[in-house]
Amino acid sequence: MIRISRAAKAIVGGLSAGAAAAVTAVQDQVVTGGETVTIVLAVLGALGITYAVPNRQLAPERATPGQGL
């Protein structure tokens, strides 16, 4: 299984949250101050929450693959 670091997950989460907020903000071709604050808060919130939640630990295998039960 591919292991992804907590920082990489946080960066991707922040970028996607910021992109979603920015796309919504530019629908009228103008980005206001309030929309800028919303974009920044979306990025910071996604970065913080994604970084704070630890990766799930994989459970040890109960049976060796290919060996049956």
Image (cartoon, rainbow, N blue to C red):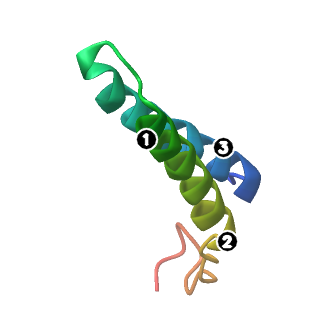
- For marks 3 and 1, give the CA distance: 23 Å
Q: Position of residue 53 (x, y in %)?
A: 61, 73
Indicate whether 48 appears above or below 60.
above
Give whichever of discs 2 and 1 has the lower sequence position.
1
Q: Nearer the viewer, residue 54 or 4?
A: 54
Residue 2 in sight: no
Neighbour tally class for label 1: few under 14, some 14-19, many 20 plus, Cα within 10 Å? few
Give whichever of discs 3 and 1 has the lower sequence position.
3
Q: Nearer the viewer, residue 14 or 24?
A: 24
- Residue located 39% across and 37% down the image: 21
Q: Say which quarter of the image contains residue 14.
A: top right
Horizontal relation, residue 69 to residue 47: left or right: left
Q: Nearer the viewer, residue 28 or 51?
A: 28
Q: Position of residue 50 (x, y in %)?
A: 59, 62
Location of mark 2 (residue): 52
Give whichever of discs 3 and 2 has the lower sequence position.
3
Residue 31 in sight: yes
Observer-side mark, 3 or 1, equals 1
Q: Position of residue 20 (x, y in %)?
A: 38, 35
Q: Are marks 3 and 1 in contact (CB under 8 Å)?
A: no
Observer-side mark, 2 or 1, equals 1
- For marks 3 and 2, give the CA distance: 12 Å
Indicate whether 23 appears above or below 33.
above
Location of mark 1 (residue): 34
Amino acid on which disc 2 is placed:
Ala
- Residue located 64% across and 77% down the image: 57
- Residue located 62% across and 53% down the image: 44
Location of mark 3 (residue): 11
Identify the element where label 1 is drawn: helix
Indicate whether 38 appears above or below 18.
below
Outermost residue, left side? 28
